[in-house]
Amino acid sequence: MFIHIGDDHVIQSKDVVAIIDHSLMTSSSIIEEMIFNQRKNRRVVETEEDHVKAIVITNDYIYFSPLSVFTLKKRANMKTTLNKLEDFSEESGG
């Protein structure tokens, strides 16, 4: 399943390691260091700083997203919702 994370970026949900609120970046030296190191390796996909609401960490890249953690979580859980709808239609359609 794919997740649209904003700014025309679409990633595979299976690659998502974590989705973190952007406000936590300044309060965690570990997150700051990880992003600093990944920037050196050109593995950070950034958006305009004043629009960033969430940080999406995948196996290969770190994305700065203008969407909130809540919105991204809903999009990531859409597969579960679709599966439930499919299960329901199979049960009622028999």
Image (cartoon, grey):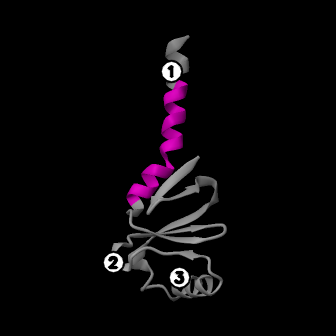
Depth check: give the residue in front, 74 or 67: 67
Say what secondary structure mark 2 lies in: helix
Q: Residue at x 56, y 76 (%)?
A: 44
* Lower position in the chain sequence, tag 1 or tag 2: 2
From mark 1 to mark 2, how far is it between C-alphas? Answer: 43 Å
Residue that label 1 marks? 89
Q: Quadrant of the C terminus?
A: top right
Q: Residue at x 38, y 78 (%)?
A: 23
Question: Relative to residue 49, is residue 76 drawn left or right?
Answer: right
The secondary structure that most of the magenta stretch takes on is: helix
Query: Measured from the top left, where is residue 82 in percent x and y?
Result: 50, 35
Query: Measured from the top left, where is residue 74 in percent x and y?
Result: 43, 50
Question: Relative to residue 70, is residue 39 drawn left or right?
Answer: right
* Lower position in the chain sequence, tag 3 or tag 1: 3
Amino acid type of the residue that numbered disc 2 sits on in the rendered structure: Asp
Depth check: give the residue in front, 52 or 26: 52
Q: Which residues are magenta?
A: 70-87
Query: Measured from the top left, where is residue 78 in percent x and y?
Result: 48, 44
From mark 3 to mark 2, how far is it between C-alphas? Answer: 18 Å
Tag in front: 1 or 2: 2
Q: Residue at x 44, y 63 (%)?
A: 7
Say what secondary structure mark 3 lies in: helix
Residue that label 3 marks? 31
Q: Which mark is residue 13?
A: none
Q: Which mark is residue 50?
A: 2
Q: Residues within 10 Å of mark 1 (few under 14, many from 20)?
A: few
Question: Relative to residue 71, is residue 11 drawn left or right?
Answer: right
Question: Relative to residue 22, is residue 82 drawn left or right?
Answer: right
